[in-house]
Image: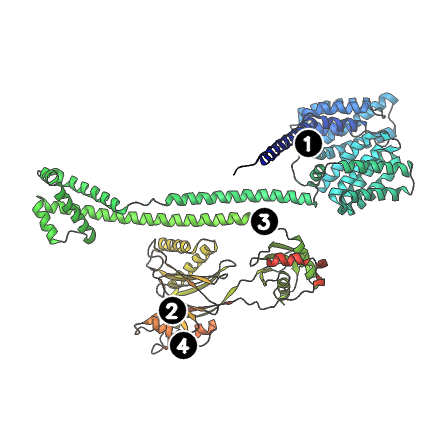
Amino acid sequence: MIKTSEEMGTAKVAEKLNGIWTKCASSGQALKSGAKTVLYDWGIFIAILGFLLGRAMILSELTPFILPFLAAVFLLRRSQSLIAAASLLAGAVFSFHGQFIFAIAGIGFFLILYKCMKMFMKHPAKSLPYLVFSASIATRLSLVFLTEGGLSQYAMMMATVEAALSFILTMIFIQSIPLVTGKRGGQALRNEEIICLIILLASVMTGTVGWTINEAVLQHSFASYLVLVFAFVGGAAIGSTVGVVTGLILSLASLASLYQMSLLAFAGLLGGLLKEGKRIGVSLGLLVGTLLIGMYGQGGGLGASVSESAIAITLFLLTPKSWLTKVARYIPGTVEHSQEQQQYLRKVRDATAGKVERFSSLFQTLSNSFHTPSKNEEEEHDHEVDVLLSRVTEKTCQTCMLKEKCWVQNFNATYDSMKQMVQESEVHGTVVDPKLQRQWRSHCRKPDQVMAALNAEVNHYRANKELKRQVLESQRLVADQLLGVSRVMGDFAKEIQKEKQPHVIQEEDMVDALRNAGLEVGHIDIYSMESGSIEIEMSVLCSHENGEAEKIIAPMLSDLVKETIVLMREEPGFYSNGYSHISFGSAKPFAVETGIAKVAKGGEWLSGDNYAMIKLNSEKFAVAISDGMGNGEKAHLESSETLKLLQKVLQSGIEETVAIKSVNSILSLRNTEEMFSTLDLAMIDMQDAGAKFLKIGSTPSFIKRKDHVIKIEAGNLPMGIFHEFEVDVVSEQLKPGDLLIMCSDGVFDAKRQVENKEQWMKRMIKEIETDDPQEVADVLLEKVIRSEKGIVIEDDMTIVVTQLKHNTPKWSSIPIHPKTTKNKKSAPFYKQATGT
């Protein structure tokens, strides 16, 4: 296609714009990385914190922040401890408290104590708070003694208070400094960690004492800004907590700021309650709190408080959204934190699924390695015959004086004759054709010796060929089993990667509807809303004796989603509060009803026949009959073990033919006696009513469809005889109302004098007038027993009748009035539920 000059010009402009955007993005990323390096790696951020903490003071004379900060940095980021010490001293120099001598003396005394402790302890860091306490109280008392010439009780008390605060702040700073320096992982903050972080930030703010803009105190503005940030990301609880802690620290720094505790706590509460209004709502909460508290009057006046709040609001509105999002990731209960947790769980899930997929790939590779490449059987046979003849000639013709006459002058005749004898010996075990014997005797000088050697080699060849066949069959079985495991693990990996789809509106509508109906519902989780595959789980307090989940909740959900919903699983008292865990799902188009009738040989209690009804998943249902060889306990155990193995393998997800081969392999390897069992298996799909029949040594099954009877037959030897056999699968499309009749050989062979037993069974089935599965099984078994003279039960008899029918739930849907749903928001819910 030829482009016009205008299109080419537009493409060039777009390409240039794309290049500019890429350069800007890379420049922004580089700038961000550079700023992070300067702040954190170069220690600028530590220097800022140290400078402000060096200026900080509480109770008008105590500076308990210097030594704890230095100790925490010394422990966590020792490479920047010199920067921290210099910034602390600089803060002490440019402060109004005049504690420079205490700062430098305390730092020196702390380092001396640490060096001394290191001589006696392998891990002196564990005693860090005690070292800070000792350095603080010793330094303060020494300075007081030198300056005042003695120690008063007041001085000793204040020194003890300062040292105790330093002890506590050391432990707080050790937990909180990694939070502000980016050295902590993405885990959520505990409540204790949030408090420690707020204490650190509030302590840093006390270092801004004396900074003002006109009448506005910047210390108060920064505290209000901090409350705004946490109220916005954490809500009312976090906002009010931050307000109380920050106000407490500020009031200790200056008694004039005592009212700030109530102001900040109230502002954090209001801001958190108004966080749905975004930044404007949170800012409005601070402004309203300032006006309400300011009406009581305080030293600076209402105008100063409003100015301080205005500065805080301005800083808050100018804060980048990415910063607020990053803070929110660490606060439990926030949307960002939930997304972060989901992302973490998604990574774990994907990693697990990746491992499962790698195992699946491994098993598939192993399966491929057991598959032998197909060969030309004719060429391979000719090659093996040539090798066989070479061994025969080596034993006989090499010592013959006339070998040149046979193999040089008459090579074709000799070779053809010996090849014909090999073929004859392969079929009959020896050369039995008189004509071929006479021909060879007339050709060879040592005919008996050659034929004996040839027969021996052919016997070895046949044994090796049989062994190769068994090995090949075993390889194929192992390959099929490994491939089946690979497919199961692949499907499992896909199931792991399935995510719960967001259906918030639909979940809220369901909760409101059920609660308005008087049910106590905890929560509802919708995992799928696809038509025919709806999956809903909930916690609810209901009566299990009266079947509320099946009779009330499922019909109400059916009306909501406009699709028949049925109870899938119910776990009473699953949760600690007494609520039950209940699962609901879409009703399948078809359902089955079964009837069983069986009797043991001679009327005994123990039968060699066994049957099983296996629900593989929500879409497939299996019916199986196994007949152990003979009668009595051994036959019963054999057939029972066959069905147990089959059930476990099928429920693992392995395809049915591979499952049967696996069970046969296990039985054939395990059997030391001549004990075998038959298997009659029917797999019914509940979605489309398709059925697969696998018959291993079993009698035919029959499908009764109104007045017609259809025979289902497949020929295979009983299980456990051979290691490998081919499984014939017969497929049939069932229709609603069909009766599937499966029986053991004791039923089919009961009337021995009848030549055409199939027609006899069809006639009896057709004569049955009822269509109830249990009645059909009972009537048919009675007919079979009474068909024999003397009513002698000569073999175990089992009849399993399965009827396919449309799935009609027992309980109709319960209509829900539109007013019961939340503000009539259910229109999107119905559309999505029905797929319209």
Q: Three-letter amino acid code at disc 3?
A: Glu
Tag nearer the camera, 1 or 4? 4
Position of residue 732 measured from the top left corner of the image (x, y, whole percent): 42, 63
Position of residue 682 measured from the top left corner of the image (x, y, whole percent): 43, 62
Work out whether residue 136 or residue 104 is closer to the camera in this orientation and state it. 104
Q: Give the image quarter of residue 816.
A: bottom right
Tag nearer the camera, 4 or 2? 4
Q: Which residue, given by chain and number where applicable, does mark 4 sit on?
A: 767
- Determine the CA span between mark 4 and mark 3: 54 Å
Kind of element beneath mark 4: helix
Label whose residue precedes the other's in the sequence (4 or 3): 3
Q: Is residue 130 above or below residue 287?
A: above
Q: Residue at x 9, y 44 (%)?
A: 444
- Determine the CA span between mark 1 and mark 2: 79 Å
- Residue 796, disc: 2
Q: Which residue, given by chain and number where applicable, does mark 1 sit on?
A: 126
